[in-house]
């Protein structure tokens, strides 16, 4: 996922679920993710700009902007996860 705008998502931005491999998330803007209390779902995997499950592997997350994310900008588990050069406000 590259060069995208993800805006006003009540629950979460990108969810890398089970068996997502060799994924690149680069040069995106995440704005107002889970920013309105009571509008999203309840659970540990909700409200994140990017969520990666424990089965995600070989993921690169770089050069993204996270503005007004209500929970975690980046929540990651898994193997060989590379998170670098992101701006979190």
Image (cartoon, rainbow, N blue to C red):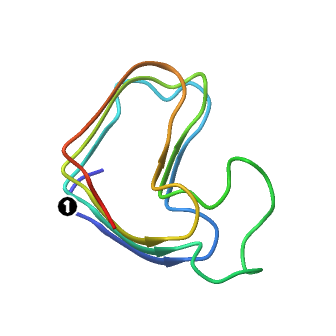
Residue that extends furthest to the front in the rendered view of this protein: 89
How many marks are shown on the rendered structure?
A: 1
Q: Residues within 10 Å of mark 1 (few under 14, many from 20)?
A: few
Instruction: Tell me residue 71's x, y (percent).
Output: 58, 61
The residue carrying mark 1 is 3
30, 86: nearer the viewer: 86
Side (left or right) of 79 relative to 71: left
Side (left or right) of 71 relative to 31: right
**Residue name at image x 57 percent, y 78 percent:** 35
Residue that extends furthest to the right in the rendered view of this protein: 42
**The C terminus, quarter of image:** bottom left
Instruction: Tell me residue 81's x, y (percent).
Output: 38, 25
Relative vertical location of residue 69 with respect to residue 82 in this rendering, above or below: below
Q: Quadrant of residue 40?
A: bottom right
Relative vertical location of residue 38 with respect to residue 78 in this rendering, above or below: below
**Residue name at image x 79 percent, y 52 percent:** 43
Instruction: Tell me residue 15's x, y (percent).
Output: 55, 48
Residue that extends furthest to the top in the rendered view of this protein: 79
27, 66: nearer the viewer: 66
**Residue name at image x 71 percent, y 81 percent:** 37
Instruction: Tell me residue 57's x, y (percent).
Output: 44, 20
Q: Secondary structure at mark 1?
A: loop
Q: Quadrant of residue 42?
A: bottom right
**Residue name at image x 53 percent, y 55 percent:** 72
Side (left or right) of 45 relative to 9: right
Q: Quadrant of residue 25?
A: top left
């Amino acid at each position: 996922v590259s060069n995208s705008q993800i805006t006003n998502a009540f629950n979460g931005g990108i969810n890398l679920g089970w068996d997502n491999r060799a994924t690149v998330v680069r040069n995106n803007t995440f704005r107002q993710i889970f920013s309105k209390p009571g509008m999203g779902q309840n659970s540990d995997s909700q409200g994140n700009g990017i969520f990666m499950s424990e089965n995600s592997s070989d993921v690169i997350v770089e050069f993204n902007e996270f503005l007004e994310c209500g929970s975690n900008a980046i929540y990651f588990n898994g193997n060989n996860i590379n998170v670098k050069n992101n701006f979190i406000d």
